[in-house]
Image: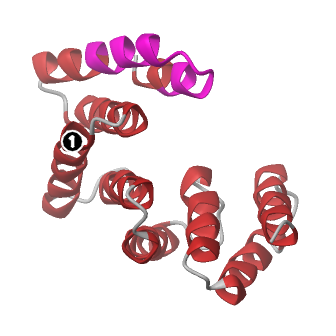
Amino acid sequence: AATLAHAELRAGHRNAAARAADDSLRAARRADSAPALVFGLAAAATVAAYAGATEVAARHAGELISIGDRQPMFSCVQQGQLVLGFLALSRGEAAAARDYYLSAWQLLDKRLPGQPAMPALRWHLVDVLIEAGDVDAARRRIEEFASVPSNPLAAAVAARGRGRIAAL
């Protein structure tokens, strides 16, 4: 249900995404499953953030970060920071968003060096660096993506970033 929530959100079906996220989180809490809880919280936080339910999104993101601080599993902290960064950017706080995204990026690179995991984090970081006026840093991140060999996702993120900068 968590994956379905993200898919529904990307398709623009916010009500269906909210139902799937709620189902995922409710089932995870009922099953008392840490991995399921992580996926459910990430889905619920993301859907709430996109819906403008900032308090709910921040609460779920905080719970994700707390789980990750206690036991580093999956990408709890990064997922929480991604949501908090999105919320900051939505409030027009580009510098705060940049800090959340950079922190998540650094944690991710420690765990998966050179891998283009969490593409939303990658392109949001480029966006927020541009919004914060740090175009040179955005270019450096874009070139990091472009240097990942034989990876269409990294190439797509790099192309998207180059397009954003060209549009300035």
Q: Which residues are magenta?
A: 6-23
Quarter placement of the N terminus: top left
Give the answer, above or below, for where 63 lies relative to 166: above
Q: Quadrant of residue 158?
A: bottom right
Give the answer, above or below, for where 75 lies relative to 110: above
Instruction: Give whichever of 58, 80 is nearer the camera.
Output: 58
Q: Which residue is mark 1?
A: 60
Which residue: 22% across, 56% down?
A: 65
Which residue appears farthest toward the bottom when viewing the image? 136
Judged left or right of residue 82, residue 8 is right
Judged left or right of residue 86, residue 166 is right
Q: Position of residue 64 (x, y in %)?
A: 23, 48
Judged left or right of residue 112, residue 104 is left
Q: Position of residue 156 (x, y in %)?
A: 82, 53
- Is residue 148 visible to the viewer in this orientation of the structure? no
Which residue: 18% across, 28% down?
A: 33
- Is residue 42 visible to the viewer in this orientation of the structure? yes
Q: Position of residue 114 (x, y in %)?
A: 65, 72
